[in-house]
Image (spheres, rainbow, N blue to C red):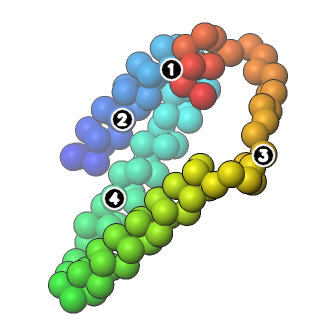
């Protein structure tokens, strides 16, 4: 019963976000809601194992990579040579509302 309530709530949110209760939106929202509910119920049934040493190793590794990436960006910005090639990519969006274009 709880799964059904979750699916209904997710479909209502989906249709509210799209702003159009068309059959296509209802069906796509239903498919997405069922997938989300099934996926998260599957995750919950699996036991969670926390390994503190592995988590600490990952945190240190992530911090080093974050600093390394920041230094690479800083060097690229400060260096006198222009290695960055900027540009604009034009993609035509037909039939989209202003709100959807802003979201994209």
User: Marks 2 and 3: which is nearer the front?
Assistant: 3
Q: Is residue 83 left or right of residue 20?
A: right
Classed neighbour count for the residue bearing mark 1: other residues with Cα under 10 Å, few (<14), some (14–19), many (≥20): few
Mark-to-mark CA distance, 3 and 4 = 42 Å
Mark-to-mark CA distance, 2 and 3 = 43 Å
Q: Which residue is mark 4?
A: 40
Which of marks 1 and 3 precedes in the sequence? Answer: 1
Q: Residue at x 78, y 36 (%)?
A: 87
Is 97 rendered above or below residue 5? above
Mark-to-mark CA distance, 2 and 1 = 12 Å
Which of marks 1 and 2 precedes in the sequence? Answer: 2
Q: Residue at x 30, y 78 (%)?
A: 60
Q: Residue at x 25, y 67 (%)?
A: 44
Q: Which residue is mark 1?
A: 18
Classed neighbour count for the residue bearing mark 3: other residues with Cα under 10 Å, few (<14), some (14–19), many (≥20): few
Classed neighbour count for the residue bearing mark 2: other residues with Cα under 10 Å, few (<14), some (14–19), many (≥20): some
User: Marks 2 and 1: which is nearer the front?
Assistant: 1
* Secondary structure at numbered mark 2: helix
Evaluate if marks 2 and 1 touch, with contact meaning CB atoms under 8 Å apart: no
**Camera-side residue of 81 and 47:** 81
Can you name the residue that lies furthest to the front here? Answer: 80
Which of marks 4 and 2 precedes in the sequence? Answer: 2
Which of marks 3 and 2 precedes in the sequence? Answer: 2
Which of marks 1 and 4 precedes in the sequence? Answer: 1
* Secondary structure at numbered mark 4: helix
Q: Which residue is mark 3?
A: 85
Evaluate if marks 2 and 4 touch, with contact meaning CB atoms under 8 Å apart: no
Which of marks 4 and 3 precedes in the sequence? Answer: 4
Location of residue 48 in the rendering, given as x and y in whole percent from the top left corner: 22, 78
* Secondary structure at numbered mark 1: helix
Mark-to-mark CA distance, 4 and 1 = 23 Å
The mark found on residue 10 in the picture is 2
């Amino acid at each position: 019963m709880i799964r059904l309530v979750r699916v209904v709530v997710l479909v209502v949110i989906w249709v509210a976000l799209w702003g159009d209760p068309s059959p296509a939106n209802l069906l796509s929202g239903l498919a997405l809601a069922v997938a989300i509910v099934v996926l998260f119920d599957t995750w919950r049934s699996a036991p969670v194992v926390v390994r503190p040493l592995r988590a600490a190793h990952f945190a240190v590794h992530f911090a080093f990579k974050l600093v390394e990436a920041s230094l690479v960006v800083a060097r690229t910005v400060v260096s006198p040579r222009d290695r960055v090639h900027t540009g604009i990519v034009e993609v035509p969006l037909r039939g989209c509302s202003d709100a959807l274009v802003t979201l994209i």
